[in-house]
Image: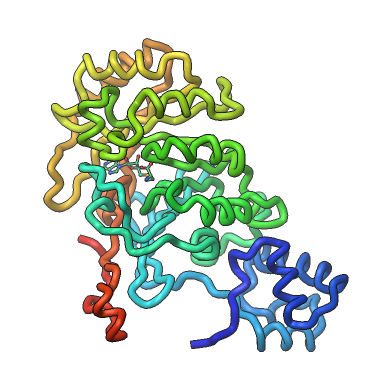
Amino acid sequence: MTAARSLIGLDREALKAALVAEGVGQREAQMRARQLWNWIYVHGAQAFEDMTNLAKPFRLFMGERFALIRPEIMAEQISSDGTRKWLLRAAPGVEFETVFIPEAGRGTLCVSSQVGCTLNCRFCHTGTQKLVRNLSPGEIAGQVMVARDALRDWPSTSKNRRVTNVVMMGMGEPLYNFDNVKAALAIVSDGDGLALSKRRITLSTAGVVPMIPRAGAEIGSALAISLHAARDSLRDVLVPLNRKYPLVELMGAARAYPGLSNSRRITFEYAMLKDVNDSVADARELVRLVRGIPSKINLIPFNPWPDAPYECSSWEQIEKFAEIVNRAGYASPVRTPRGRDIMAACGQLRSESVKPRASARLAEIRPAQPASMPG
Ligand code: SAH
């Protein structure tokens, strides 16, 4: 274990300040910070000695004081459809998942914001894992870096890059870890950083209404809202957060999201649950609810997990539902399930990490169970 401080996840100012704190002069620190930033985020350097245009003594100096720590890959699974899932470890007992979904002409990385989740959505596997902790900016942006390492996808500015889009749709609720997600996405969208434009980044929320305007103003990515029901009585059950922030408030926040237009639409996610939310009447109610909001409705065939209390709607029913939404003037793509065979599809992510009980922490005992893949 090294006590050296990791630079990954610091913003540009903090990176410079870290150098100054170690005795580097202000002007030199400014320049060095710029060079380091470029090495770390554009070229994916994993060690200071690889930064070949920096003077050797400076590389040694950096290596003695700082580190470049990424989450560690504990396991990789590859689906028959090419989807890859990595189990990553941030620290002992702190494990989470990241998924890469290759498609024709693009590659989407599904990034986690928390280990576990507090929301308990009834149909979501992650919701069966209690929150262990928030991920830090370095651990969030680090997921993009680990994916680029594994896919040999550096430099970040390359024309043929494989990771072209990021969705904050992994484990956790990003708007309950706002500051860290914001800091991470600033690095992800930095043109001289991980270089994915904000239009290629989508933040998904179950509906933390008070944070939605801040997400719009301070993060500025595309927004997805996990809707799943068009009336409060049902949404209260499926997404318990709805009891705190009911649909009228959620739709108000959606409508006010900055920069909405036909080319910048909100995505409403709607998991198709057999005989629960998939009737023709449900589709009509949904159309009424989103009326006037530039939006598309992403229909997600429910992805099963062990002991899940729901089933996926039939294909006929999904098509019927999609057609009603579509006829009302809203795009209603059905999301092709990806990576189901490795439990990598929407809502299937989970790790075995548990928060150590206070008594165990006091006794300095490590959590009893090492984390492993779900299944
Ligand atoms: N907490 C955020 C980020 C998670 S995104 C949010 O709720 O938006 C994961 C998406 O997959 C959400 O839309 C979630 O509702 C959906 N989902 C969860 N479980 C699912 C399942 N079993 N099948 C299909 N979609 C699911």
Quarter of the image for residue 15 reads bottom right
Residue at (27% x, 38% y) in the render:
239
- Relative horizontal placement of residue 60, taking residue 104 as reference (left or right): right
Horizontal and vertical percent for residue 268?
A: 40, 30
Image coloring type: rainbow
- Quadrant for ligand 1? top left
In the rendered image of this protein, does residue 227 appear above or below residue 198? above
Residue at (20% x, 60% y) in the render:
375
In the rendered image of this protein, does residue 218 appear above or below residue 25? above
In the rendered image of this protein, does residue 288 appear above or below residue 14? above
In the rendered image of this protein, does residue 94 appear above or below residue 11? below
Residue at (30% x, 47% y) in the render:
119
Residue at (63% x, 49% y) in the render:
189
Horizontal and vertical percent for residue 296?
A: 44, 25
Q: Is residue 151 visible?
A: no
- Relative horizontal placement of residue 272, taking residue 45 as reference (left or right): left
Quarter of the image for residue 138 reads bottom right
Horizontal and vertical percent for residue 294?
A: 50, 20
- Relative horizontal placement of residue 253, taking residue 258 as reference (left or right): left
Q: Is residue 365 visible?
A: yes
Q: How many marks?
A: 0
Horizontal and vertical percent for residue 64?
A: 66, 88
